[in-house]
Amino acid sequence: MAVIDKNITPAEVAALGEGHLAYLREISSDEIAARFPGMPPITPGLRLWGLFGASGQPILLTDERAEALASAMQNELIPVSLH
Protein backbone atom coordinates (compact mmCIF):
# COMPACT_ATOMS: atom_id res chain seq x y z
CA MET A 1 0.00 0.00 0.00
CA ALA A 2 1.34 3.42 -0.97
CA VAL A 3 1.85 6.07 1.67
CA ILE A 4 0.74 9.56 0.70
CA ASP A 5 2.74 12.51 1.96
CA LYS A 6 0.19 15.10 3.02
CA ASN A 7 2.79 17.83 2.49
CA ILE A 8 2.99 17.30 -1.27
CA THR A 9 2.27 20.43 -3.27
CA PRO A 10 -0.20 20.70 -6.17
CA ALA A 11 2.76 21.23 -8.52
CA GLU A 12 4.38 18.02 -7.31
CA VAL A 13 1.15 16.10 -7.88
CA ALA A 14 0.89 17.50 -11.41
CA ALA A 15 4.48 16.47 -12.16
CA LEU A 16 4.04 12.84 -11.03
CA GLY A 17 2.96 11.53 -14.42
CA GLU A 18 4.59 14.13 -16.66
CA GLY A 19 6.04 12.50 -19.75
CA HIS A 20 4.22 9.26 -19.00
CA LEU A 21 0.52 10.03 -18.56
CA ALA A 22 -1.90 12.07 -20.62
CA TYR A 23 -5.55 12.62 -20.05
CA LEU A 24 -8.41 12.81 -22.49
CA ARG A 25 -11.24 15.16 -21.73
CA GLU A 26 -14.30 16.10 -23.66
CA ILE A 27 -14.27 19.87 -23.90
CA SER A 28 -16.70 22.48 -25.14
CA SER A 29 -15.55 24.87 -27.83
CA ASP A 30 -16.54 27.57 -25.32
CA GLU A 31 -13.70 26.40 -23.01
CA ILE A 32 -11.04 26.40 -25.70
CA ALA A 33 -9.82 29.97 -25.23
CA ALA A 34 -8.90 29.18 -21.61
CA ARG A 35 -7.24 25.82 -22.35
CA PHE A 36 -5.61 26.54 -25.70
CA PRO A 37 -4.34 30.13 -25.66
CA GLY A 38 -3.81 31.62 -29.08
CA MET A 39 -6.40 29.44 -30.82
CA PRO A 40 -8.58 31.20 -33.35
CA PRO A 41 -12.27 31.45 -32.43
CA ILE A 42 -14.24 28.23 -32.91
CA THR A 43 -17.98 27.86 -33.40
CA PRO A 44 -19.66 27.96 -29.96
CA GLY A 45 -21.35 24.84 -28.61
CA LEU A 46 -19.16 22.19 -30.27
CA ARG A 47 -18.07 19.14 -28.27
CA LEU A 48 -14.39 18.36 -28.86
CA TRP A 49 -11.69 16.18 -27.29
CA GLY A 50 -8.58 17.57 -25.65
CA LEU A 51 -5.41 15.61 -24.91
CA PHE A 52 -3.48 17.09 -21.98
CA GLY A 53 -0.20 16.24 -20.31
CA ALA A 54 -0.25 15.18 -16.66
CA SER A 55 0.42 18.79 -15.64
CA GLY A 56 -2.55 20.03 -17.69
CA GLN A 57 -0.44 21.29 -20.60
CA PRO A 58 -2.54 21.07 -23.81
CA ILE A 59 -1.18 18.64 -26.41
CA LEU A 60 -3.97 18.17 -28.98
CA LEU A 61 -7.49 19.25 -29.81
CA THR A 62 -9.69 17.16 -32.10
CA ASP A 63 -13.32 16.32 -32.81
CA GLU A 64 -12.66 12.56 -32.52
CA ARG A 65 -11.89 10.77 -29.25
CA ALA A 66 -10.13 8.00 -31.18
CA GLU A 67 -7.73 10.52 -32.72
CA ALA A 68 -6.81 11.91 -29.29
CA LEU A 69 -6.29 8.37 -28.00
CA ALA A 70 -4.12 7.46 -31.01
CA SER A 71 -1.99 10.56 -30.47
CA ALA A 72 -1.37 9.58 -26.85
CA MET A 73 -0.31 6.09 -27.93
CA GLN A 74 1.95 7.41 -30.73
CA ASN A 75 3.71 9.60 -28.18
CA GLU A 76 4.09 6.64 -25.78
CA LEU A 77 1.81 8.25 -23.19
CA ILE A 78 -0.55 6.24 -21.01
CA PRO A 79 -4.00 7.74 -21.65
CA VAL A 80 -6.58 8.22 -18.93
CA SER A 81 -10.05 9.68 -19.33
CA LEU A 82 -11.56 12.42 -17.21
CA HIS A 83 -15.30 12.81 -17.07
Image (cartoon, helix red, strand yellow):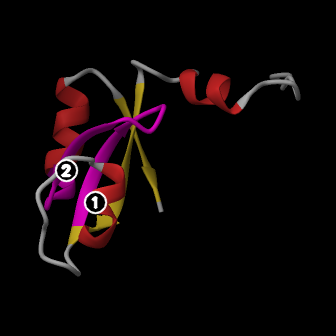
- Are there few (<14), some (14-19), or many (20+) residues within 10 Å of tag 1? some
Q: Earlier in the sequence, mark 2 or mark 1?
A: 1
Q: Tell me the tag on residue 60.
A: none
**Is 59 left, or right, of 24 in this rendering?**
left
Q: Nearer the viewer, mark 2 or mark 1?
A: 1
- Amino acid on which the number 2 mark rests in the picture: Leu
- Amino acid on which the number 1 mark rests in the picture: Ile
Which residue appears at 17% of the width and 26% of the height? 74
The secondary structure type at the circle numbered 2 is strand
CB contact under 8 Å: marks 2 and 1 = yes
Q: Which residue is mark 1?
A: 32
User: Is residue 46 one of those drawn in magenta?
Assistant: no
Which residue appears at 19% of the width and 76% of the height? 46
Which residue appears at 29% of the width and 72% of the height? 30
In the rendered image, the quadrant that contains the N terminus is top right
**Is 32 left, or right, of 17 in this rendering?**
left
Foreground of the two, 15 or 70? 15
- Are there few (<14), some (14-19), or many (20+) residues within 10 Å of tag 2? many
Which residue appears at 12% of the width and 76% of the height? 43
Q: How many marks?
A: 2
Q: Which residue is mark 2?
A: 61
Give the magenta part as a residue range. Answer: 48-66
The secondary structure type at the circle numbered 1 is helix
Residue 12: percent from the left, percent from the top?
66, 22
Residue 77: percent from the left, percent from the top?
33, 26
**Is 23 left, or right, of 32 in this rendering?**
right
User: Is residue 57 one of those drawn in magenta?
Assistant: yes
C-alpha gap between disc 2 and disc 1: 9 Å
Residue 38: percent from the left, percent from the top?
19, 47
Foreground of the two, 13 or 65? 13
